[in-house]
Amino acid sequence: MLVFETKLEGTNEQYQLLDEAIKTARFVRNACLRYWMDNQNIGRYDLSAYCAVLAANENFPFVAKLNSMARQASAERAWSAIARFFDNCKQNKTGKKGYPRFKKEQTHGSVEYKTSGWKLSSDRRYVTFSDGFKAGTFKLWGTRDLHFYQLKQFKRVRVVRRADGYYAQFCIDQERVERREPTLKTIGLDVGLNHFLTDSEGNTVENPRHLRKSEKSLKRLQRRLSKTKKGSNNRVKARNRLSRKHLKVSRQRKDFAVKLARCVVQSSDLVAYEDLQVRNMVRNRHLAKSISDAAWTQFRQWVEYFGKVFGVVTVAVPPHHTSQNCSNCGEVVKKSLSTRTHACPHCGHIQDRDWNAARNILELGLRTVGHTGSQVSGDIDLCLGEVTPPNKSSRGKRKPKK
């Protein structure tokens, strides 16, 4: 599946109707979550059936205006939060398990339509929403060319409200596969705060620190917001300016992660990286802001995505002792976080700390790939010789004499 995003251009009245649809979708999602909390043994299909009950309720006439499939999509969102909570409990995840919470009214939100309630024009330049809210026709603005895909390939659309406007995300039934020439190179990646990235060849990428660079302007906008009167138009304007600035920082961070991940994957045939538990690392109050600003998890997700697109092997290895072990002799060399140079007293190997860790990560990644799906030599010989390997039922039994 491909997801393309375009901006919607319409009138203020149309935007208000989209707001009503988004608020209704959030109401349905919260109502389904409350229904699950108040009743036992509620499943996914029970929540979908409860959407029809909400639409027929005279106390909530606005729910019937929302498209039936859009109501079901809101129920699916509620169930995804419930299923994630159950999975965390079954896996005994440390810390909070992520109990589902109600969505509050915010500057952003979304409503999702499946196969009905909307229609894309034949020239792919306009989209029309025809549910009970009747938001009408919007013009599509964006750099994505939708003419390469048939109308039947557009499976669903999600309307997203952000600080700078309204966007439409189209889900297209098309698998993305790109071909590339093998580079015959393998690489190990070590992420950090001094340098965002250090590979096993010693190359480094500077940490952009998008949030740190924008902190001064963000603090100024936050002070202006705090001085406005609650409920006034000036407060709405100040909040929108602050939201736009935060949106810009998040877009800068995403753009950096996407471009760097694509470059790393295209330049190697195997990429090894650390399986970091960022959720636990941000508990350090001295480094929490810097770790969150680096967005290591987002970078890893894009590396794994481009690995599937380009057919490159991506391996996540345990991060234990990758910075302490010597990449030359394998001996353990204890060092604090402030020690940035690896100096091995056993073999005399001196190297940058992150470079040494990247080499260890690559070695662990190659070990993992080498043992994945392999067979022991004895089993291979038995299969080639057309001899059935012994099992529990045949042990201890003699073969009949000829």
Image (tube, grey):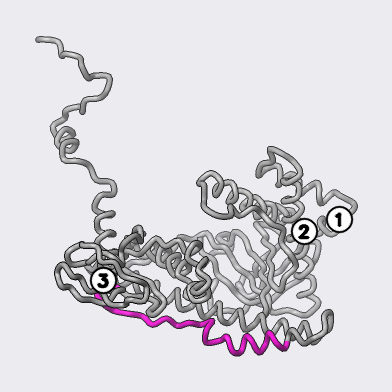
Residue farthest along the left direction in this orientation: 402
Identify which residue is drawn at 53% across, 44% down.
Answer: 90
Residue 203 highlighted magenta (yes or no)? yes
Corner quadrant of residue 367 = bottom left
Q: Tell me which residue sits at (39%, 74%) in the image.
A: 192
Lateral position of residue 219 relative to residue 327, left or right? right
Q: Residue under label 1, please give it.
A: 60
Give 378 or 116, whichever is nearer the viewer.
Answer: 378
* Marks 3/2: CA–CA distance: 52 Å
- The location of residue 123, given as percent across then percent down, is 61, 73
Give the numbered dot on residue 356.
Answer: 3
Q: Which region of the structure is painted magenta?
A: 199-224
Residue 27 is marked as 2
Q: Amino acid at mark 1?
A: Phe
Q: Are marks 1 and 2 in contact (CB under 8 Å)?
A: yes
Q: Quadrant of the C terminus?
A: top left
Query: Which numbered mark, 3 or 2, is in the foreground of this view?
Result: 3
Residues under labels 1 and 3: Cα distance? 62 Å
Amino acid residing under circle 2 = Phe
Q: Who comes first in sequence, dot 1 or dot 3? A: 1
